[in-house]
Amino acid sequence: MKNYKRHLVTAALPYANGPVHIGHLAGVYVPADIYVRYLRLRGRDVKFICGSDEHGVPITIKARQLGITPQDVVDKYHLIIKDSFERFGISFDIYSRTSSKTHHKTAADFFTKLYNDGKFIEQKSEQYYDEEAKQFLADRYIVGTCPKCGNENAYGDQCEKCGSTLSPTELLNPRSMISGNKPVMRETSHWYLPLDQHEEWLRKWILEDHKEWKTNVYGQCKSWLDGGLQPRAVTRDLDWGVKVPLANAAGKVLYVWFDAPIGYISNTIELLPNEWEKWWKDEETKMVHFIGKDNIVFHCIVFPAMLKAHGDYILPENVPANEFLNLESDKISTSRNWAVWLHEYLDEFPGKEDVLRYVLCANAPETKDNDFTWRDFQTRNNSELVAVFGNFVNRAVVLTQKYFDGKVPAVNGLTEYDEATLKELPVLKKSIEENIETYHFREALKEAMNLARLGNKYLADTEPWKLAKTDMSRVATILNVSLQICANCAIAFEPFLPFSAQKLRYMLGMTDNAKWEELGNAAILPVGHALNEAQLLFDKVEDADIEKQIAKLQATKTANAAAVKPSCEPQKPNCTFDDFMKMDIRTATVLEAERVPKTDKLLKLKIDTGIDTRTIVSGIAEYYSPEDMVGKQICILANLEPRKIKGIESQGMILMAKEPGGKMKIVAPEERLCNGASVG
RNA sequence: GGCGCGGUAGCUCAGAUGGUUAGAGCGCAUGAUUCAUAAUCAUGAGGUCGGCGGUUCAAUCCCGCCCCGCGCUACCA
């Protein structure tokens, strides 16, 4: 393996439209912090970079809803996030923000370089424009009726009611969120990063040179590469963000995905104005991005393509992305308030930063989505942290206080068993190292816990409290060995549980900074060295604490259920009799029906309309099988403009009644009539 | 529908380039112990390694099909 001179570690920039929750922590910040703390302990040259991602449309929308400016929104959340990370012991070397001057300049310069080098392509496209507000509308700024579920408040990119992904042009009755007017299509031009031109080297770089990446990351990349990369717009028509640094680009900003990863660079510049370049441009820097699985494509494909297009930059050596954490069996959701918020946890569980760090690491979603439950939190605290780690330390220290007045006793000859026990220390050290360096933090933590287990077993087997009646010299040896194991714990746990490790170091009177090289050593504490008062490393978490949290979540659930009580859609605006008479609705009978291949919802129907025999494609396969349909009499909108669906021309639309929940049934005459009877 | 990741003890997860008894922690049972926050230590019970086929002397691990969970993506006039 290559011997790197320095390590640049980045953690995904949190989006500043809400606080940080346990999902973010388990996926990104806890593992990244463990990795960085470990590297520092080993004396490596390392910088840990993060900051708030403060641009993009959702922030402007939140500002509009609250009647404040986007800057107010990001100021608020930036502070909450930064403060909660600090209190939680996430040891960034810098936590800055993309609204900083440095970032605006860095991002603009990056764009300019690529622009001057001809790395972009310029393309014109038609986009919705609000004539009153005189601006182009981002997808999120257009609301309309969802073509899929009929929700009248679907956004231009997504319907939050049925969850489907949309494009603004699909919305029925689109209107601008700014003026409420119907937007018009207008031509605009944007710059695109032609990812397709980067496909070849990306393919080699990832698929051949980085087979060691985690399977989820590698597989996701392969999937994208095999699907063929498309050019991606790097600019948007919006007034919140980094202005596009070109004369003819008024009202345009860098698209947030282009702007945000450059934030890693900007924040490094802010931290090290004079020597940042060696961290980003020297092959002897090992760069690692910690992210969640939703960010894989940006960090493995898009950002590397940007860096490569620029030319001077190194590429990440690894991108250890985690999966998602669920909360009590449900997806964590900011909008549904289904989360454990870090700043609230810190207030409600003072002094228990490490408990959360422990639980989130021990149960981290490293290979698949995992579930956080408060019961598990309690169990892990009480039967692992308290019973194994805290208890062992307490036993060793209390026994020493009792028999040797709190001074480390001398070793009077080691037995074979003592030596076998001490021999385990370097073995565990090596295992922890290997696991951390390959991003197996859960396993590494387990090995650290094995140090404490080793200590408990040693005490149980040697029984110093019995020997104290007969052989104090042997007791001295036993407690020396036990305390050395405690001292080892104080080093090994530092990356995982920094607060408790600090507390333990104080208790053991270890005043200097922890050094990783000392781990595995059987003589860290000198004989005669005075310990401090014994104090408990961890307290039990009581049932009442947990029940309070569960009740809090239950209240959220109840509130959410009340909020989404299904109700039928409001009435649409009036139409005229003439409008209605334009529609030619007829009875018809289904002659043949078959599934449209490679679709979930589509049936291809051959129907007798009384006028002719024609084909209609309809999205009803979830509710009707082809066999159900054959022979059924139905009503159709006969004079609907034909449209190609999955390559098949559909000549009309079947009338369906649909419940708010989504269930659909055919609308048909009460008794069978002839085909072609008009409905009105 | 396509693609990716996952489906291993009651729970949370390791693991094996295919090879004699598949591992850990928690939980459970029994025993030991009392220095310790009733904390610890030992022993044990508990798994046709998602289902069905195939390749192989041998498959939980390879191949095919299917089912389930998560994600990306297509379709719904």
Image: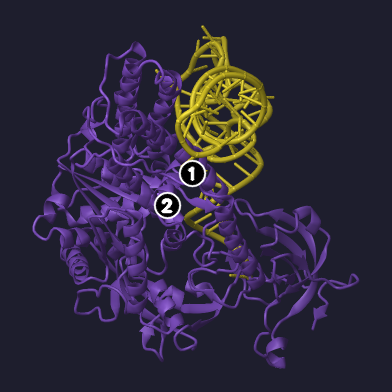
Chain colours: A purple, B yellow
Residue at 34% across / 19% down in the picture?
A472
Left or right: A335 in relation to A101: right
Residue at 36% across / 16% down in the picture?
A471
Left or right: A671 in relation to A520: right
Residue A193's quadrant in the figure?
bottom left
Q: Nearer the viewer, residue A611 or A490?
A: A490
| The C terminus of chain A - image quarter | bottom right
Do the CB atoms of the residues marked 2 and 1 lie less than 8 Å apart?
yes
Amino acid, disc 1 = Asn
What residue does disc 1 label? A381
For mark 2, give the secondary structure. loop
Eyeballing the image, is A69 above or below A633?
below
User: Which residue is at the far front?
Assistant: A469
Amino acid, disc 2 = Lys
Left or right: B28 in relation to A282: right
Give residue A352's mark.
2
**What is the chain identity of the residue bearing mark 1?**
A
Residue A517 in picture, x, y percent from top left = 21, 32
Residue A66 visible to the viewer:
yes
